[in-house]
Amino acid sequence: MFSMEICECKENHGIKFRTEPYLLQGTYGTIEIFPRGRDSLNFGFCKHCDKPYLSKEKAKEIVRDVLEKRQKEKGLLTGEELRELREQTGLTVREFGALTKINYGRISAIENGYVIQSKANDQVIRMKTKEFIKRNNPARKKLKKVFAKLMQQVDTSKLFLNKIMFYVDFWNFKKTDKSITGGEYIPLQYGPCPKDYDEILQEMIDDGEITPIKGYSFNVNKEPDMSEFSKEEMETINEIISLAKHDKGQELFELSHKEKGFMETPSYE
Ligand SMILES: [Zn+2]
């Protein structure tokens, strides 16, 4: 924690200015503040006690400004940037602390400009936030629900699963001009594959939604909540499921070959 001790003398002893840096004492070290030059902070010091002649509010503001400046100089997130990042996740300071495994009091202190984070913590914060936002993207969540539904209904391998998934989106797109999940597909040799396919499945495993069996198929551990899907979307999903169940999906595969042109489109939304 950095805080500036200010002059609390009862009388006015007069002010002096200085050009040499002022050492701001913190719990874990010191920061040099340059009254002139680098920080261009023009404040005076009490001639009697030698402490900055400032109001509490002004002292706080200066500490915050200097910390922010040092963060920028070091390529670290500023307190405000950290707060914005956290707000993007929708998490409270406490929850954000749990996510990043950084004490939430510290998170709060960084946000409020009392503390400068270490480079390592800065990287952890950026990485965990990015991961969290990606993982909780509404399209990704929807995609996972469809995956769970497909795994539950169709006895399928991992490779077949991504083909059916593509067909769910494709079929709905053909009927309504909209994909169901809004997910992106990348063209691979054996057909289009949802972007981050392996990562998505791994997240589902980590979250306990599914369990891999023999490394290529999956057990669904809890009933997926399909309440956000429209009647039309559920129709599409069920149509594809029955197609996939029928003759082990042979028909679906043949259909997929006929649609080659369309399938080479990497993504649609
Ligand atoms: Zn004083």
Image: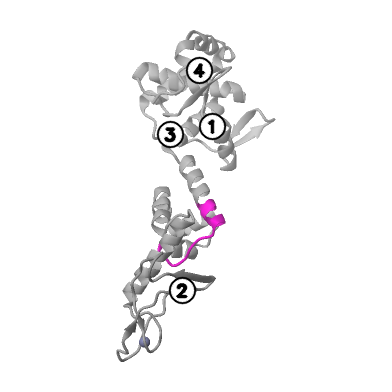
* Helix, strand or loop at mark 3: helix
Q: Residue at x 48, y 44 (%)?
A: 130
Q: Camera-side residue: 157 or 122?
A: 122
**Mark 2: which amino acid?**
Leu
Residue 267, disc: none
Q: Relative to 202, is 269 above or below?
A: above
Q: Position of residue 76 (x, y in %)?
A: 48, 55
**Mark 3: which amino acid?**
Ala
Residue 191 magenta: no
Question: Ligand 1 appears in which quadrant?
Answer: bottom left
* Helix, strand or loop at mark 1: loop
Q: Position of residue 176 (x, y in %)?
A: 34, 19
Which circle's residue, 1 or 2, is located before the other in the chain? 2
Mark 3 vs mark 1, foreground winner is 1
Q: Relative to 269, is 17 above or below?
A: below
Which circle's residue, 1 or 4, is located before the other in the chain? 1
Q: Which residue is mark 1?
A: 196
Q: CA distance from mark 2 to mark 3?
A: 48 Å
Q: Which residue is mark 3?
A: 139
* Helix, strand or loop at mark 4: helix
* Helix, strand or loop at mark 2: strand
Q: Position of residue 258 (x, y in %)?
A: 49, 8
Q: Which residues are magenta?
A: 111-125
**Mark 4: which amino acid?**
Ser
Residue 119 magenta: yes
Q: Which residue is mark 4?
A: 242
